């Protein structure tokens, strides 16, 4: 059974709209006070499960984090119709984004909405006893950690709330918490989740022990805690729960969803419609439509908005005979030669390439707006990522280069590439290159460059001491009474 998220429009009757939430329309100002009802909830397992589904629901809005995580790096260009198509995306691409960037405010608001929904459950975690309650609490705790990890990656120091909601009025007293303290809480949450989550779930899409361990390993890696990262990632690798799929071509197709390589996957569906007035309300993967081929006609694929186009540089980063290249990148000119009747339009910053992993394909329901309702799941943590993180931890932590080579070469062998025998810094470089080509299009590269202090030399327009994080949305600082300091350089 695949987990079905509850649309945001339905959930507002259950949750308090906070300073960090974004409503879908002005109609919500007409409803009665939520304070009166929120305290009376959580009287049964069903109510806990509904609230938990609501926490999962915000995962679908992370499509924007993934897309901008590529565009901010040197992997892709903004693209779109023109240089003024969705200005916030263009600004991030050019590293000229400001505190009034609409897309950055969306990431802030949507991730904090996820935090608040998790904290709503955790605030009342002891209210009602039922069988399996520990599992529900563990899932909510994992999701809080996941949303906070996104916030720290994007914004650095952020307000930290633990087991309590951020309510209207809290903006007058709450401060930004140093990211080291936020990381410490994320670690606590993921250790708890790993200890209390099952290895497998009956319902596809729910988080597992392996997902918590893998995310914890990534959190350790972001803090250069290499020994801890190596230890916890080894637990995932040695568990026998996950493996690399044999057929790399299938990973990003419908038949490749939730397979043995998927450690954590965000579920999407095309069963419900969506519109531009509330992108976070879509149950579909919005990024897929944005990444699509402009005005396309032909086999296999559907049309889209031509954002997030891969650069020639990243295409050239693939070694000869690497089978991953044609899975990650669609060469539209070559495709047109190989298939009769193909036509397409050239958009802004056209490179001739598209993010094939996440562009819309024929065969879905085309529920309107079809470009916003693609059912393609996002593979948030893949086993290949776990292997490469473990390789990096063993190498950069000066723990065991032979083991690092073993993990790296498992990934390369599937790609039909020769083994790497380098050690030391040369091995580090090889691991970095492998992460880039293996995970192209999956939203990780910008943050990999930042955490390894390579961003300034790789990203045009990147300013050290500034662009490692993004600006706090100016409206949030204003709502806090202008008490918060903006991130440096903004």
Image: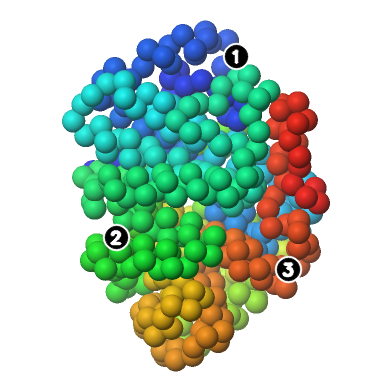
User: Residue 42, image x and y in percent?
Assistant: 33, 20
User: Residue 65, image x and y in percent?
Assistant: 57, 50
- Return the residue at label 1: 29
Label number found at residue 456: 3
Q: Quadrant of residue 142?
A: top left
Q: Quadrant of residue 333?
A: bottom right
Characterize the local packing of mark 2: few (<14), some (14-19) or many (20 or more) Cα atoms within 10 angstroms. Answer: some
Q: Residue at x 29, y 60 (%)?
A: 259
User: Residue 72, image x and y in percent?
Assistant: 66, 59
User: Residue 428, image x and y in percent?
Assistant: 53, 80
In this view, 256 is above or below 155: below
- The answer to whether residue 326 is left or right of residue 476 is left
In this view, 399 is above or below 367: below
- The answer to whether residue 393 is left or right of residue 174 is left
- Return the residue at label 2: 259
Q: Which of 337 and 146 is in front in this view?
A: 146
Label number found at residue 68: none
Q: Mark 3 or mark 2: which comes first in sequence?
A: 2
**Number of dots carrying numbers:** 3
Tell me how far mark 1 sits from mark 2, CA to CA.
43 Å
Which tag is nearer the camera, tag 3 or tag 2?
3
């Amino acid at each position: 059974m695949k987990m079905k998220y509850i649309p945001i429009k339905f959930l507002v009757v259950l949750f308090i709209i906070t300073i960090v939430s974004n409503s879908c329309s002005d109609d919500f100002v007409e409803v009665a006070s939520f304070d009166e009802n929120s305290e009376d909830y959580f009287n049964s397992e069903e109510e806990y499960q509904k609230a938990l589904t609501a926490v999962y629901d915000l995962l679908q809005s992370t499509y924007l984090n993934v897309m901008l995580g590529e565009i901010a790096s040197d992997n892709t260009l903004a693209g779109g119709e023109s240089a003024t198509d969705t200005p916030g995306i263009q600004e991030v691409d050019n590293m000229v984004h400001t505190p009034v960037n609409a897309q950055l405010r969306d990431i802030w608001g949507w991730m904090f909405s996820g935090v608040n929904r998790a904290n709503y459950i955790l605030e009342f975690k002891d209210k009602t006893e039922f069988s399996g309650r520990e599992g529900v609490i563990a899932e909510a705790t994992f999701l809080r950690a996941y949303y906070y990890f996104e916030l720290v990656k994007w914004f650095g120091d952020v307000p930290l709330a633990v087991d309590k909601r951020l309510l209207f009025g809290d903006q007058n007293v709450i401060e930004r918490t140093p990211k080291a303290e936020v990381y410490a809480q994320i670690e606590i949450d993921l250790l708890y989740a790993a200890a209390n989550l099952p290895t497998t779930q009956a319902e596809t899409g729910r988080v597992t022990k392996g997902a918590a361990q893998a995310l914890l390993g990534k959190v350790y890696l972001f803090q250069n805690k290499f020994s801890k990262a190596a230890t916890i990632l080894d637990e995932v690798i040695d568990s026998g729960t996950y493996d690399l799929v044999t057929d790399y071509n299938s990973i990003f197709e419908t038949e490749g969803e939730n397979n043995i390589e998927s450690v954590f996957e965000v579920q999407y569906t095309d069963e419900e419609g969506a519109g531009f007035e509330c992108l976070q309300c879509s149950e579909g993967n919005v990024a897929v439509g944005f990444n699509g081929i402009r005005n396309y006609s032909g086999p296999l694929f559907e049309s889209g908005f031509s954002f997030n186009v891969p650069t020639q540089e990243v295409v050239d980063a693939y070694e000869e005979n690497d089978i991953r290249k044609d899975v990650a990148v669609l060469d539209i000119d070559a495709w047109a030669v190989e298939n009769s009747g193909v036509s397409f339009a050239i958009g802004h910053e056209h490179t001739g390439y598209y993010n094939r992993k996440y562009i819309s394909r024929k065969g879905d329901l085309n529920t309107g707006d079809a470009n916003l309702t693609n059912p393609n799941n996002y593979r948030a943590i893949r086993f290949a990522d776990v292997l490469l993180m473990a390789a990096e931890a063993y190498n950069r932590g000066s723990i065991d280069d032979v083991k690092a080579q073993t993990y790296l070469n498992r990934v390369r062998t599937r790609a039909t590439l020769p083994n790497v025998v380098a050690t030391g810094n040369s091995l580090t470089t090889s691991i970095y290159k492998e992460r880039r080509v293996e995970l192209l299009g999956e939203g990780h590269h910008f943050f990999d460059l930042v955490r390894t202090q390579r961003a300034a030399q790789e990203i045009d327009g990147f300013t050290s001491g500034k662009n490692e994080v993004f600006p706090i949305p100016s409206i949030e600082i204003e709502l806090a009474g202008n008490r918060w300091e903006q991130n440096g350089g903004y």
